[in-house]
Amino acid sequence: MALARTLCRRPRLVLLDEPFAGLDRPLVRELAAILKEWQERLRFTLLAVDHDPLILEGLCPRVIALEEGRVVQRGDWSELARAPATPTLRALLDVSP
């Protein structure tokens, strides 16, 4: 509901913190597709934080990966997948949805 109220104001930037926490994968996919459609229609920038990077892959074309509060890598998804900068990032990206 809060997101709907926010989008009614036609923001230029939307910040999301773990937007799909606690939801099952099918519902996450459905909600992510709806959010992506709104993003394209309303043309806002989306800044999202999540511990499961694969959830955000379709929503956010560019990534900044943090470990212990420090930036360890930035780029697009293909760059991260091709050469993850740390073992932790490699493990996160190897998880199957």
Image (spheres, grey):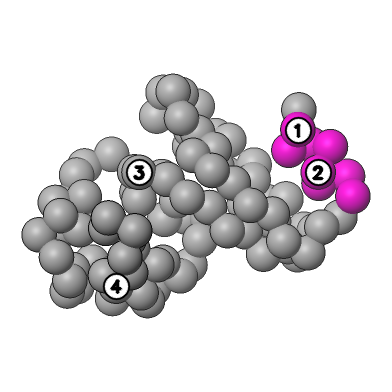
Taking 88 as reference, is 76 left or right? right
Judging from the image, what secondary structure is the residue with disc 1 in?
Answer: helix
Judging from the image, what secondary structure is the residue with disc 4 in?
Answer: strand
Dots 4, 1 in contact, CB < 8 A: no
Q: How far apart are marks 3 and 4 (CA)?
A: 15 Å
Q: Is residue 9 visible?
A: yes
Residue at image location 64% in from the left, 42% down from the top: 34
Q: Which numbered marker is on residue 6?
A: 2
Of the residues under marks 4 and 2, which one precedes in the sequence? 2
Taking 11 as reference, is 95 left or right? left
**Amino acid type of the residue that numbered disc 1 sits on in the rendered structure:** Ala
Q: Which residue sits furthest front?
A: 69
**Amino acid type of the residue that numbered disc 2 sits on in the rendered structure:** Thr
Judging from the image, what secondary structure is the residue with disc 3 in?
Answer: loop
Taking 94 as reference, is 8 left or right? right
Bounds of the magenta span? 2-9
Within-10-Å neighbours for mark 1: few <14, some 14–19, many 20+: few
Of the residues under marks 3 and 4, which one precedes in the sequence? 3
Q: Is residue 78 visible?
A: no
Taking 73 as reference, is 36 left or right? right
**Amino acid type of the residue that numbered disc 4 sits on in the rendered structure:** Gln
Q: Is residue 3 magenta?
A: yes
Of the residues under marks 3 and 1, which one precedes in the sequence? 1
Residue at image location 19% in from the left, 44% down from the top: 95
User: Where's residue 92, x and y in %?
Assistant: 21, 50
**Amino acid type of the residue that numbered disc 3 sits on in the rendered structure:** His
Q: Which residue sits furthest right?
A: 9
Q: Distance between the residues labelled 1 and 2?
A: 6 Å
